[in-house]
Amino acid sequence: MTNSSTDFADAAQEERLKFYYFVRAGFSVVWVVAAFTLAQHSSALASILLVAYPAWDAAANFVDAARSGGLGKNRTQAINVAVSVATTLAVILALQFSMNWVLAVFGAWAILSGLLQLGTALRRWKSFGGQWAMILSGAQSALAGAFFISQARMPAPPSVSNVAGYAAVGAVYFLISAVWLSVKDLRREAQSP
C-alpha cells in the first residue's frame, strides 16, 4: 500500500469518525431536550428515554467499532457494547423498583463506559490525534458515575433530569471532538497546494 492510499484511508476514517461524533452529539442534544421538557410531564416517556440512552450507546459503539476494523480490533468498544446492553436490561429491571435504583445503575454504567471510552480515545490518539475531549469525557463520565451512586443513596427520589445533565455534558464533548476534527481538515486543506 502506498503512502497516498494510506493517507486516503486515514482521511476517510477520520471523516467517518467526525460524522460519528456529530451524530452522537445530535442524538444527545435531542435526548436532553426531551428529558428536560416532555419527560417532565410523562413518567412513561422518562422511562423510555432512560432505557433508550444506554441502548443507543450500545448501538453507536457497535457501528463505530464495526466500521473501524471490527469488534476484535476495537476491544474497548466491544466491551462497551456488552456493558451498555447489560445496562439497558438493568435499567428496565431497576425501573420496576425505584428511580434510586435506576440512578445507581446509571452510575455503575457511567463509570465503566467512561473508562472504556477513555481507553478508546487513547488508542485513537495515535491515529487521529485530537482525542483530548474524548479523554476528558471518559474521565468525567467515571467521576459522574460515582456521583450518581452517591445521589442514588439519598432519600429524595432522583428523576430523568439527573441523567440529562450528564448527557448534556457528553453532547458537548462529542461536539467539541467533531469540530476539532473539522478544524484539522480545514487546516490540512489550507496547507495543501
Image: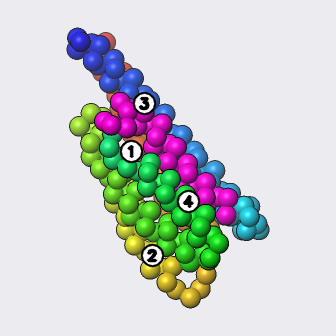
Disc on the earlier residue, 3 or 1: 3
Disc on the earlier residue, 4 or 3: 3
**SS of the residue at dot 4?**
helix
Q: Which residue is mark 1?
A: 78
How packed mark 1 is, by other alpha carbons closer than 10 Å (few <14, some 14-19, many 20 or more), is many
How packed mark 2 is, by other alpha carbons closer than 10 Å (few <14, some 14-19, many 20 or more), is many
Rounded to the nearest angstrom, the CA distance separating label 4 from label 3 is: 25 Å
Q: Residue 93, position in %: x, y? A: 59, 67
Dots 4, 1 in contact, CB < 8 A:
no
Q: Residue 77, position in %: x, y? A: 38, 45
* Residue 19 shows in the view: yes
Q: Amino acid at mark 3?
A: Arg
What residue appears at the point 44 percent right and 37 percent down from the top-left corner?
A: 64
Residue numbers of the magenta segment: 47-73
Q: Amino acid at mark 2?
A: Ile
Q: Nearest to the eye among marks 3 and 1: give it.
A: 1
Rounded to the nearest angstrom, the CA distance separating label 2 from label 3 is: 34 Å
Find residue 89 and name its label: 4
- The answer to which of 160 and 184 lies nearer the viewer is 160
How packed mark 3 is, by other alpha carbons closer than 10 Å (few <14, some 14-19, many 20 or more), is few
**SS of the residue at dot 2?**
helix
Query: Looking at the figure, which quarter contains the N terminus?
Result: top left
Dots 2, 1 in contact, CB < 8 A:
no
How packed mark 4 is, by other alpha carbons closer than 10 Å (few <14, some 14-19, many 20 or more), is few
